[in-house]
Image (cartoon, helix red, strand yellow):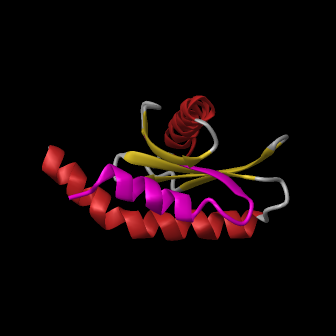
Amino acid sequence: MLKPKVLTELLAQETTGGIMSTILLKSNGSLLAFAGSGDKEARVTAAIASSIWTAYHSNIKQSFHTESLNFVLMDCDDGKVAITSISDLLLCLHSKKSVGLGLLKTKTLALAKYLEGPLSELDHAVA
């Protein structure tokens, strides 16, 4: 069983070394858990990340005739953002500009791999 407090603590462990926030959200933008910046900012970031993921996913399907979008990595004015999917959820990490894109991608994929098992079990329990 996945406990919300444990999930938040796990996300908080990744919020180091220039990572400002770690967010787990539903594909519709609903915030499930986060660590880092304030609640209001995390909700806005979750909504934006969901919109970006949906737009890219839709364009990938139309342009390349494939269903798979694995990762989105962006360099923004106020930092860098990485988004990936885990089951039917999205994982988003927001970092400072000083964090390298490779490090951000590595941290995001490592956390996604770690969470994949427990989150897929949760997905099956809810279904």
Residue 24 visible: no
Pick the front one: 75 or 94? 94
Tell whether position 24 is magenta: yes
Residue positioned 72% across, 66% down in the render: 17
Q: Quadrant of residue 121?
A: bottom left
For the question of whether residue 27 can be seen, the reply is: yes
Pick the residue in front: 109 or 20.
20
Residue placed most toward the observer, 60 or 45 = 45
Q: Which residues are magenta?
A: 1-25
Q: Is 65 left or right of 59, judged from the image as shown?
A: left
The percent position of residue 65, horizontal first and vertical second, equals: 48, 45
Q: How many marks?
A: 0
Q: Position of residue 20 (x, y in %)?
A: 69, 51
Residue 77 shown in magenta: no
Residue at image position (55%, 40%) is 53
Q: Which residue appears at 52% of the width and 71% of the height?
A: 110
| Residue 36 at x, y percent in the picture | 61, 48
Q: Is residue 73 above or below residue 77?
A: below
x and y percentages locating residue 99 in the rendered image = 79, 62
- Depicted 76 relative to depicted 98: above or below: above
